[in-house]
Amino acid sequence: MRFWNNVEEYTIPAVTDAEQAALAFQATEPIIIQVGGMEHIARLEPVGVSSVVLDEIAATYAAIEIVFCARTKSATNVDNLWLRFNDDDDTNYDYFDHRKRNANDDISYVDNDTEFVLLAGAAGDDCPSGHFAFGEWLIGNANAGLPSPKSVTGRTYNIRTGTGTSREQRYWSGRWQNTVDAINQIEIGTASGEEFMSGSYFDVFGLPS
């Protein structure tokens, strides 16, 4: 597994019977997994819904990373995903999208003052059976102590057609124009309004200040 803060692959050692019993005893307490400075905040597994919300994010994270695997019920081969922060649905977001398809097909798109950051391409129902798009996002300046807008960068990979002959790599960047508030809520939704399919997940990590 690779993280944005340059932590390379790691191996989780085997758990002894005694350690397993101790973990079971502590199951009612919050458990934070920390790898190379990144804390695992939560895993979101949306099924039967078109959006999912993570509330009560600590205001102490300098950056937030989201690693995801997603497929929706959209009839297309790509269903874009969007992000919102702190329940802000006003036109306070900008984003840029660059797509590379197969060998020579390059497409770029930009939009300003939108109601969300459009930031990923999930697999749609026209993709090969069982295929999920995967990618990662990094949200910078997440806490209130940093005066710049909240920046977002990301990348995704997807197989676009049922035959598997068209592949797409996408690079995204955007921002939430808020320069005052720490990010305490993240909402992720599908552009089509269609539901996420079973097997989709979003792992959220935080880098403490």
Image (tube, rainbow, N blue to C red):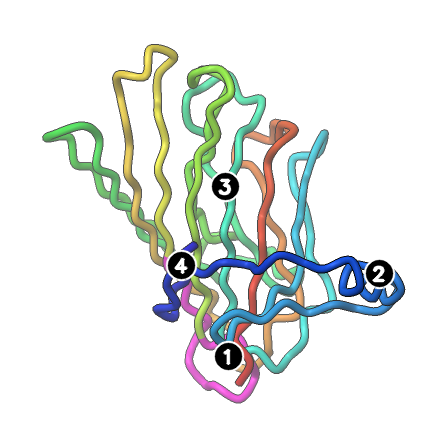
In the image, which residues are magenta?
141-153
Give the secondary structure at mark 3: strand
- Which one is closest to the eye, mark 3 or mark 4? 4
The residue sitting at 61% across, 64% down in the picture is: 40
Describe residue 203's horizontal placement relative to residue 176 as left or right: right
The residue sitting at 66% across, 70% down in the picture is: 184
Give the secondary structure at mark 1: strand
Using the image, tell me which numbered label, if any, was put on residue 62. 1
Towards the viewer: 140 or 44: 44
Query: What secondary structure prevails in the magenta region?
Result: loop
State the quadrant of the N terminus.
bottom left
- Which one is closest to the eye, mark 1 or mark 4? 4
**Residue 143, image quadrant:** bottom right
Q: Amino acid at mark 3?
A: Leu
The residue pinned by badge 2 equals 21
- Which one is closest to the eye, mark 2 or mark 1? 2
Using the image, tell me which numbered label, if any, was put on residue 81. 3
**Residue 168, image quadrant:** top left
Find residue 155 and report its horizontal and vertical position in percent: 35, 49
The residue sitting at 56% across, 84% down in the picture is: 144
In terms of sequence position, does the residue under pointer 3 or pointer 2 come before the other?
Answer: 2
